[in-house]
Image (cartoon, rainbow, N blue to C red):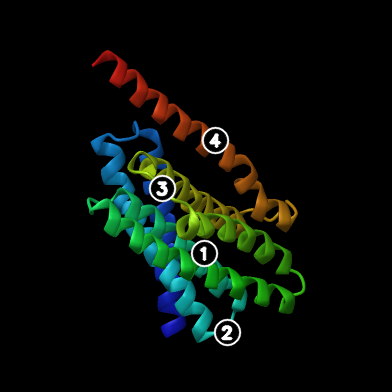
């Protein structure tokens, strides 16, 4: 009963997160529509990550536990960068999140050695997590970098939502392709979107 309730909540929140994330992506970055849809996306993805961890504990599943940790890291790090918090305090919080991310990556690598077929997926996601979390912990970030940090991590969370949808509904393609494909395609698109955002800021500054 508990597992079924968690599973229904997990699937529902995942679907709502995908819808909210898609809506947020349509709106111009920095607009009210983007902000409102993005907040709903963050909430639903947080629920999705938390229920993934809960499901993996009710029925032991190291793979799902690792994916849940990965999701929570992306949302936590992405959300804090856009919050109206004093920048120095924000960077301190981010370092803590980054350390938690590195610990999560260590778990994913360890679990990967114990899971025969899905281990490679955990290794790849752990590598991505190490890169992002290391930036949180070690890189000196300026206030102008906050939108880039936010966009990269929330974009990564959206890729996670798309990946979960494909894994659940597409069965005609190799599983590794389904798991990795959205990251390979989505990452450059996120980078392009972030670049356009900063170019827009530059144009506005020149006009004013």
Q: Residues within 10 Å of mark 4 (few under 14, many from 20)?
A: few
Location of residue 196 in the rendering, given as x and y in whole percent from the top left corner: 44, 27
The answer to whether one can see residue 118 in this image is: no
Q: Nearer the viewer, residue 72 or 206?
A: 206
Question: If you read the primary sequence from the N terminus, does the residue marked by circle 1 or circle 4 appear first?
Answer: 1
Whether the residues at callouts 4 and 3 have beta carbons within 8 Å, the answer is no
Quadrant of the image for the N terminus? bottom left
Spatial CA span between label 4 and label 3:
23 Å
Question: If you read the primary sequence from the N terminus, does the residue marked by circle 1 or circle 2 appear first?
Answer: 2
- The residue drawn where x is 58% and y is 68% is 105
The answer to whether one can see residue 143 in this image is: yes
Closest to the camera, between mark 1 and mark 3, is: 3
Whether the residues at callouts 2 and 3 have beta carbons within 8 Å, the answer is no
Location of residue 52 in the rendering, given as x and y in whole percent from the top left corner: 48, 72
Spatial CA span between label 1 and label 3:
22 Å
Question: If you read the primary sequence from the N terminus, does the residue marked by circle 4 or circle 3 appear first?
Answer: 3
Quadrant of the image for the C terminus? top left
Question: If you read the primary sequence from the N terminus, does the residue marked by circle 2 or circle 4 appear first?
Answer: 2
Question: If you read the primary sequence from the N terminus, does the residue marked by circle 2 or circle 3 appear first?
Answer: 2
Asked if 72 appears above or below 183 in the picture, the reply is below
Q: Which mark is residue 60?
A: 2
Q: Secondary structure at mark 1?
A: helix
Spatial CA span between label 2 and label 4:
35 Å
- The residue drawn where x is 28% and y is 43% is 35
Residue that label 1 marks: 70
Q: Which mark is residue 189?
A: 4
């Amino acid at each position: 009963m508990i597992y079924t309730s968690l599973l229904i909540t997990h699937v529902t929140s995942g679907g709502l997160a995908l819808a909210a994330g898609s809506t947020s992506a349509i709106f111009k970055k920095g607009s009210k529509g983007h902000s409102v849809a993005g907040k709903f996306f963050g909430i639903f993805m947080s629920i999705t990550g938390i229920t993934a961890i809960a499901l993996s504990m009710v029925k032991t599943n190291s793979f799902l536990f690792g994916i849940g940790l990965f999701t929570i890291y992306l949302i936590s790090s992405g959300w804090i960068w856009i919050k109206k918090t004093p920048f120095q305090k924000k960077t301190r919080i981010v370092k803590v999140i980054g350390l938690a991310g590195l610990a999560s990556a260590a778990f994913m690598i360890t679990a990967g050695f114990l899971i025969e077929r899905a281990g490679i997926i955990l290794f790849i996601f752990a590598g991505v997590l190490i890169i992002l979390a290391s930036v949180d912990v070690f890189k000196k970030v300026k206030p102008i970098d906050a939108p880039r940090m936010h966009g990269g991590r929330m974009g990564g969370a959206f890729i996670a939502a798309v990946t979960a949808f494909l894994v659940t509904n597409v069965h005609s393609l190799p599983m590794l392709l389904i798991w990795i494909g959205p990251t390979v395609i989505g990452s450059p698109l996120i980078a392009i979107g972030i670049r356009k955002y900063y170019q827009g800021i530059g144009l506005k500054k020149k006009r004013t």
